[in-house]
Image (spheres, rainbow, N blue to C red):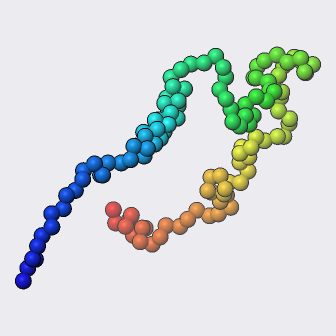
Amino acid sequence: MGAAHVEELHDDAARAQLPKWIAWTLVTLAVVALIPPLWIARARVVTSDQPRWHTFTDMDYQPKFKPQTVSTLFADGRADRVPVAGTVARGQLRDDERLYRGIDPDAEPPKPEPKQAEQESQM
């Protein structure tokens, strides 16, 4: 038993191409996708007289005194102020020995374990 007749299939190669409007759309999208990276690359290379654009200015432009500068705000003419007596800068309070050095000042020194003492005496 076998096939009685075999039909020939004629495949048209022109039908396998993309429609032109899809090809032009893909090319347009590729060109548009290249714009942001090229814009960023240009911004990294080109210098400008204008200051940078800040999204969040935070404390960049706050009024402040630089160290060792003159100020008309205070009678002595200095911008630096002497710290108030008794103040401690953040993170500089070192009163707790256990917390900062890991040492308990009230504890007794540890006693050597018996196995270590035997090994040291044999050496």
Which residue in the rendered view is the most extreme toward the right?
A: 75
Q: Is residue 108 left or right of residue 5?
A: right
Q: Is residue 11 left or right of residue 42?
A: left
Q: Position of residue 16 (x, y in %)?
A: 29, 52
> Is residue 92 visible from the viewing direction of this image?
yes
Q: Position of residue 52 (x, y in %)?
A: 65, 26
Q: Position of residue 45 (x, y in %)?
A: 50, 23
Q: Give the residue drawn at x 76%, y 23%.
A: 66
Q: Give the residue drawn at x 42%, y 67%.
A: 116
Give the vertical position of 42 relative to 123 (above or below): above
Between 50 and 20, which is closer to the camera in this rendering?
20
Between 31 and 119, which is closer to the camera in this rendering?
31
Q: Residue 98 appears in which quarter of the rendering?
A: bottom right
Give the vertical position of 104 relative to 28 (above or below): below
Q: Give the residue drawn at x 36%, y 48%.
A: 18
Between 100 and 4, which is closer to the camera in this rendering?
4
Q: Position of residue 21 (x, y in %)?
A: 43, 44
Between 106 and 81, which is closer to the camera in this rendering?
81
> Is residue 44 visible from the viewing direction of this image?
no
Number of marks present in the image shown: 0
Give the vertical position of 117 relative to 64 (above or below): below
Which residue in the rendered view is the most extreme toward the bottom?
A: 1
Q: Give the residue drawn at x 46%, y 38%.
A: 28
The quarter of the rendered structure image containing the C terminus is bottom left
The quarter of the rendered structure image containing the N terminus is bottom left
